[in-house]
Amino acid sequence: MKNRSQLHHVRLSDNSRSFSPRTGEHCPANGWWTPLDADDGACFITEGSIMPAVHGAPVLWSPTVRPAQRSYAASAGPAGLASLDTA
């Protein structure tokens, strides 16, 4: 089995490489990551996971803010049914 280095939180690390891990390296922290050299969107990668390639090519990754979530209508459920949150 491959040896894994100790993981450090991105904000606490002084090593600049931890802010831009390469494809094949372990992700330093849970969060949304975007490829630096590609126009692809952000993806959520968990700490310790292997950083993926983009379109089969290795890339550098950068942490980013969470992308905007879709908004759904409040009445998306069947008509006449109460929410489980209501008393």
Image: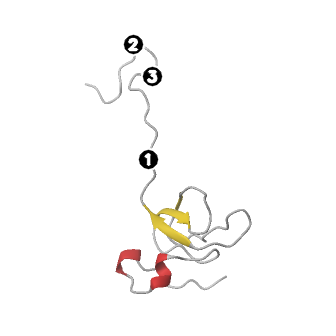
- Provide the residue designation for mark 1: 68
Q: Which mark is residue 80?
A: 2
The type of colouring in the image is secondary structure
Q: Residue at x 43, y 35 (%)?
A: 71
**Where's residue 79, x and y in %?**
43, 14
Quadrant that contains the C terminus: top left
**Where's residue 39, x and y in %?**
60, 59
Q: Earlier in the sequence, mark 2 or mark 1?
A: 1
Q: What's the amino acid at mark 1?
A: Ala
Q: What's the amino acid at mark 2?
A: Gly
Quadrant that contains the N terminus: bottom right
Write down the quadrant of residue 10 in the picture. bottom left
The answer to whether residue 54 is left or right of residue 84 is right
Q: Which mark is residue 1?
A: none
Mark 2 vs mark 3, CA separation in Å: 9 Å
Q: Residue at x 61, y 57 (%)?
A: 40
Q: Residues within 10 Å of mark 2 (few under 14, many from 20)?
A: few
Mark 3 vs mark 1, CA separation in Å: 22 Å
Looking at the rendered image, the disc whose residue lies closer to the viewer, 3 or 1, is 1
* Residue sitting at the far right: 56
Secondary element at tag 2: loop
Asked if marks 2 and 3 touch (Cβ < 8 Å), the reply is no
Secondary element at tag 1: loop
The answer to whether residue 49 is left or right of residue 83 is right
The answer to whether residue 87 is left or right of residue 20 is left
Q: Which mark is residue 77?
A: 3
Q: What's the amino acid at mark 3?
A: Gly
Secondary element at tag 3: loop
Write down the quadrant of residue 50 in the picture. bottom right
